[in-house]
Image: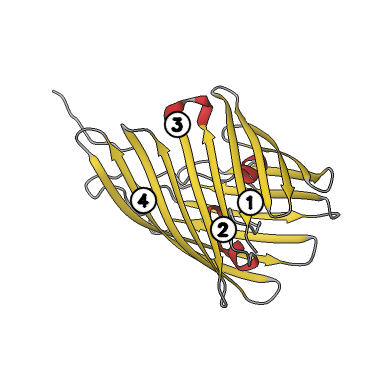
Amino acid sequence: MLITSAAIAAGENFPIGTRPASLANTYVMQADIWSVYHNQAGLGFYPHFSLGFHHENKFVIPEYSLHAIALTLPVKPGTFGLSYSYFGYEKYNESKIGLGFGKNFGERFSAGVQTNLHHVYIDGEFENRNALTVEGGIQYKANEKFAFGIHVFNPARAKISAYNSDTITTTFRAGTSYIPFEKLFIGLEIEKHPDKEPVFKAGIEYQLIESLFLRTGIFTNPVQNTFGIGYKIKRISADIAFTHHQILGFTPHFSLQIEFN
């Protein structure tokens, strides 16, 4: 007797951005254009009109390529963030478009929220599937040295398919950063998925010279090492990073950001 069931392995909330990748994605407390993918509360502390592009090739497999774009637009109450990501190839792909907003409440506290539309295409029987998710978070700057962030993705456990149990991943993240002096950043973060062991992360960034940054990090479950460099000149930033999985190998990342004001 044969028993068949439908299973769609989709709905991963991919971390986006090369600077985050080089820091092992210890980014829930950061505030820049990549906050649209990590913690929308960071948008409240980022009053810049900016545009960013990201590309990575997971484990150097063409079918595992990930492309993304981000746009931030400051307005009087806060900052809007628009994001779009695409993972996969013509036979199987996942895309996500999100609209977020972050607002600060003074110099120390900020909050943000975002709504996402997920689309999954599987060649053949299943074809197109869509789902809506929400996410949001808060950030708190205790002083010039310490900052904290909390973020939750898909708390309602939205599903990519109405007729099976395949649920888009739900993620809770909390982290803190310490800046002992102006050129050094140290970040610690914990990430938890339901029914999975927590992931612990640590990242360090050092400003070697005025425009050059060196970064490294590590995270668990499974253990992966990260490292990268960043170069910023005036309003343009370019970043390169590599993450290393002990079995699957290296993943290269590249991002380019432009601030218009």
Quick one: label 1 or label 2, which is nearer the N terminus?
A: 1
Residue depicted at x 55% and y 61%: 72
Give the residue number, with chain letter if any, for mark 2: 39
Quick one: label 1 or label 3, which is nearer the N terminus?
A: 1
Tag 3 secondary structure: helix
Tag 4 secondary structure: strand
Label 4 with label 1: CB-CB less than 8 Å: no
Residue 182, given in percent of the width and then of the height, sits at: 84, 55
Q: CA distance from mark 1 to mark 3?
A: 23 Å
Tell me the kind of residue under disc 4. His
Residue depicted at x 47% and y 33%: 65
Tell me the kind of residue under disc 3. Tyr
Quadrant placement of the N terminus: top left
Label 1 with label 2: CB-CB less than 8 Å: yes
Give the residue number, with chain letter if any, for mark 1: 27
Q: CA distance from mark 1 to mark 2?
A: 8 Å
Give the residue number, with chain letter if any, for mark 4: 118
Give the residue number, with chain letter if any, for mark 3: 64
Q: CA distance from mark 2 to mark 4?
A: 18 Å
Residue 254: which numbered mark, if any?
Answer: none
Residue 146, given in percent of the width and then of the height, sits at: 76, 60
Label 2 with label 3: CB-CB less than 8 Å: no
Quick one: label 4 or label 1, which is nearer the N terminus?
A: 1
Viewer can see residue 256: yes
Q: CA distance from mark 4 to mark 1?
A: 22 Å
